[in-house]
Image (cartoon, rainbow, N blue to C red):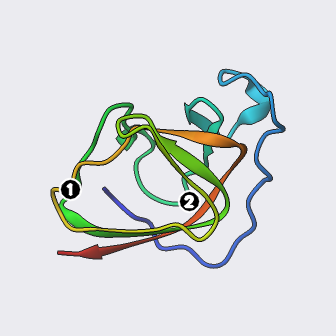
Amino acid sequence: MSFQQKEFSDFPAPPPTGTPPDSPIAQPWYSIGPGIWELLLNGDKDSHHKSPITHTYVEEVCFLQGGLRDLTLGQEWGVGAYAYRRPGMKHGPYEASDKGCLEFVRLSPA
């Protein structure tokens, strides 16, 4: 994944609830699952997956608003849920709650 150097900048608000995934008003946001909108701040847009995935890096995630349902495990998590994943740990795919999901994600080299 290639990252570009950037200074602080604003980004557009996410699409309104009920916006179809292929709607032009959603851009630059894009749908990665039912009710899940993603805005790529830096990196490669085509790196998303719709099946369980693994990473070569450490991933920490904390939900700030809304939540996700893990479609593989059939379990839901909400605000304050935290995950720490070492390289190779399978997870996902996910579906957002009715409130969407705003998360803080930190990636670190293994």
* Residue 53, percent from left and from top: 27, 43
Residue shown at 61% from the left, 42% from the top: 96
Q: Which residue is mark 1?
A: 89
Residue 85 lies, in percent from the top left, at 28, 66
| Side of 28 relative to 105 (left or right) | right
Instruction: Using a 10 Å C-alpha cutoff, classify the residue at mark 1 as few (fewer than 14 neighbours), some (14 to 19) or many (20 or more).
Output: some
User: The residue under label 2 is which amino acid type?
Assistant: Leu
Name the residue beneath numbered marker 2.
41
Residue nearest the viewer, comparing 25 with 34: 34
Is disc 1 in contact with disc 2, using a CB cutoff of under 8 Å? no
With 32 as the anchor, is 83 left or right in this view? left
Residue 27: where, in percent of width, then height? 70, 37
Please state the horizontal and vertical placement of residue 48, each as a whole percent of the image. 40, 40
Horizontal arrangement in the rendering, residue 70 relative to residue 81 (left or right): left
Q: Establish if 12 lies above or below 4.
A: above
Amino acid type shown at disc 1:
Met
